[in-house]
Image (cartoon, coloured by chain):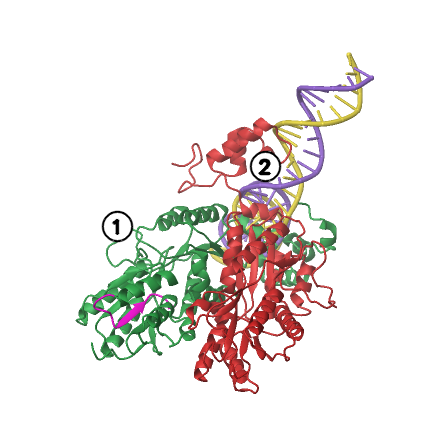
Chain colours: A red, B green, C purple, D yellow
DNA sequence: TCCATTTACTGAACCGGTTCTTGACATGGT
DNA sequence: ACCATGTCAAGAACCGGTTCAGTAAATGGA
């Protein structure tokens, strides 16, 4: 049952160490270490023999001992700073995580997830992780201008993947995405293209008064979308679009929608920064006796399954979050390996047309 | 592999070890260890002095070194075996995790999340975690009869919290929840009460032909709900309720709903095992020109925010998943501490009445 | 006052790996 | 035949803690 010839340690199963392997193979500990790590210093035959013995007696590495030597830990960190209430609803993070796991799982790397309520807590988590060498690298999201987390991570020397579009303008803090590969690469989804497609589609349907309900305005990705909207609207000769900011919640989404719909002139189409607010918008429209899409067109962002659950189903700007997560995971693994990783945009945005968009009202 | 900046990364700041503390305080390493761990062997004054010095020079424990000695690691494991596609949509897990974090965060414990595609992979993850002592304890969900994971975890000696109602009947495998506190406690939500409340509410509204669209039938919590429904229906003198099983997805939820609604006799109310399928059901009803709630009442389960996004809004059996997660986290911490934890049901179910339920059609 | 017991503290071993140093041996060039 | 070179392997130190054995001092009891 247990391995042969081992001292009976209580219920028996002390797990084998490299010393056990060395003894069983008749070599020194160091030889075993070299063999297992594919390093020079051992002849081919001995290497093969040692590996066979290790396999036979069921040796597995101790991550604790490895971490003690400063090598990889097999854990990536992700801190989420949004309120738990919102996280429960937004499928984005779950899909991102599942994409990451598709890459990390086979590599035998786990994801350490920490949800915090305040920005200061997040900084504390990074400090602790860095001090204890508990993770190999981290993911940082929802970047704002002069984000203190980036400075901290740089000081701590903790490798990080930054999920955010770069600032278009020169970045005074010096933390903008570097041109070359770095230990803190920036990865972002192509929101500019997504916004352009949505806008052109609406214009093709005859819309001209187009509004936007945005997320938290200090985040760079919100800024990027706003800039894209303004520029494209100007290019298409549209009036300046109204833009309201929210915290991504249903409540603020509903408020923003109401104030847009009772204002003058009323927009004929609204683009939302996530699915949740767009879904809520359908309810507000109903409450105001506006028919979607006959009198109002609604476009959502993310294209999670929520877009399928509403009536009418939501036209959405689509992002392949799962694939994005896979890309992020590869970047993390690269960083943990000590390599530098290229910054850059990810994938292609698409527009998933469903039932919440239609021709602009004739009166317009 | 060698990161280019070994020297620049340091910039002099090697983080302090207990040897540094010992030197600075003028005592032996062992004295420092005793002082920091609140163990006997040091006088009060020296203890205070050592703690002060440690604080001053900024000492932090190395989890690697601690783990090497077999003490706690500060990491709890959660393996999710549902397809990523479904996880993205179901808010349940995100809310559970955020509840867990509310307890674990302040204790400086992270959550290792692993998403797998197959049951065998899940077993492999447990094996690896146990072998490498990578986590202190794990959470196991979606328990089926004779679940192989429970036997494995017991054999590995990995403490686990089991999220499932117990089998009512005697459990031939011997893995049913123990009477006393144990190293593998079972925690479950009070689904029986929830089901009873929903049923009585519908009966009070005049419904008699009540159907159910269930989740995956091999899970014990599905069985528990089914049993509760059957028993309560019998007690209330209702005809045997139709029960269809699904994989929780929109597709199968829609199929099940269709087959119920085109069957004879058609049910006047349907209870769903999650929000997602109930939301989809509203679309199917619309497609069949059935008005909700005039001709069909719909009850969802979980009461996530999806219930608010639909039109009409969904009446739901409510579970405080966040609080449940907190309870689970406490149990995990107890197990990691080496204590035994009591099994038992959690909290009270409630019925959140909204717009998807109404009086049974008069024709009935 | 003297011996027994407790207490405070130190030094060293240990956990399970990695890596540096050293030495034995084989090989090759001249 | 001789020394320079290279390969393979063993031994020991080390990572940052915990813990055990041992010693010196303090305390207590009679």
Q: Main secondary structure of the magenta part?
A: loop
Q: Is residue B274 magenta?
A: yes
Q: Is residue B297 above or below residue A139?
A: below
* Residue contact between numbered discs 1 and 2, judged by CB atoms under 8 Å: no
**Residue B265 in picture, x, y percent from top left:** 21, 68
Seen at 57% across and 86% down, the residue is: A265
| Quadrant where the C terminus of chain B is found in the figure | bottom left
In this picture, is A325 found above or below D22? below
For the record, the magenta segment spans B263-275
Q: Is residue A209 visible?
A: yes
Question: Residue A169: x, y in percent?
Answer: 72, 68
Q: Quadrant of residue B78?
A: bottom left
Image position of B200 with respect to A153: above or below: below
Residue A347 is situated, as x and y percent measured from the top left of the image, at 59, 58
In the rendered image, residue A299, in percent from the top left (x then y), is placed at 52, 72
Q: Nearer the viewer, residue A155 or A232?
A: A232
Q: Which mark is residue B315?
A: none
Apparent side of residue A12 relative to residue A99 in the rendered image (left or right): left
Badge 1 marks a residue whose secondary structure is: loop
Q: Nearer the viewer, residue A125 or B85?
A: B85
Circle 2 residue: A33
Q: Quadrant of residue A160?
A: bottom right
Query: Which type of secondary structure does the marked residue at label 2 adopt?
Result: helix
Using the numbered discs, state the Cα–Cα distance from disc 1 to disc 2 in whole angstroms: 46 Å
> Which of the 4 image quarters holds residue C23?
top right
Q: Residue furthest left?
A: B237
**Label 2 crowd bin: few (<14), some (14–19), many (20+), radius 10 Å:** some
Q: Is B222 colored magenta in this rendering?
A: no
Chain to which the residue tagged by mark 2 belongs = A
């Amino acid at each position: 049952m247990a391995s042969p010839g081992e001292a009976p340690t209580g219920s028996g199963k002390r797990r084998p160490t490299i010393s056990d392997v060395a003894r069983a193979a008749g070599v020194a500990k160091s030889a075993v270490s070299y063999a297992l790590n594919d390093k020079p210093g051992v002849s081919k035959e001995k290497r093969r023999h040692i590996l066979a013995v290790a396999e036979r007696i069921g040796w597995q590495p101790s991550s604790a001992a490895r971490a003690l030597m400063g090598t990889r830990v097999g854990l990536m960190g992700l801190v989420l700073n949004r309120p738990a209430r919102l996280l429960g609803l937004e499928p984005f993070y779950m899909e991102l995580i599942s994409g990451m796991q598709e890459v990390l799982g086979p590599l035998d790397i786990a994801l350490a997830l920490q949800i915090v309520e305040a920005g200061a807590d997040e900084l504390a988590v990074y400090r602790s992780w860095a001090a204890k060498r508990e993770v190999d690298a981290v993911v940082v999201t929802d970047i704002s201008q002069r984000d203190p987390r980036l400075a901290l991570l740089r000081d701590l020397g903790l490798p990080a993947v930054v999920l955010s579009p770069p600032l278009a303008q020169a970045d005074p803090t010096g933390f903008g995405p570097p041109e070359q590969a770095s230990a803190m690469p920036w990865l972002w989804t192509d929101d500019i293209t997504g916004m352009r497609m949505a806008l052109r589609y609406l214009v093709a349907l005859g819309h001209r008064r187009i509004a936007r309900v945005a997320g938290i305005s200090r985040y760079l990705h919100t800024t990027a979308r706003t800039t894209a909207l303004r520029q494209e609207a100007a290019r298409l000769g549209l009036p300046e679009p109204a833009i309201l900011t929210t915290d991504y919640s249903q409540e603020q989404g509903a408020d923003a929608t109401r104030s847009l719909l009772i204002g003058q002139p009323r927009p004929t189409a609204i683009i939302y920064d996530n699915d949740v607010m767009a879904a809520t918008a359908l309810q507000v429209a109903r409450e105001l006796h506006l028919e979607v899409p006959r009198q109002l067109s609604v476009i959502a962002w993310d294209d999670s399954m929520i877009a399928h659950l509403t009536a009418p189903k939501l036209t959405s700007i689509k992002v392949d979050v799962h694939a994005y997560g896979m890309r992020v995971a590869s970047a993390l693994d690269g960083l943990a390996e000590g390599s530098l990783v290229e910054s850059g945009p990810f994938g292609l945005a698409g527009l998933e047309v469903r039932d919440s968009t239609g021709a602009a009202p004739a009166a317009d």
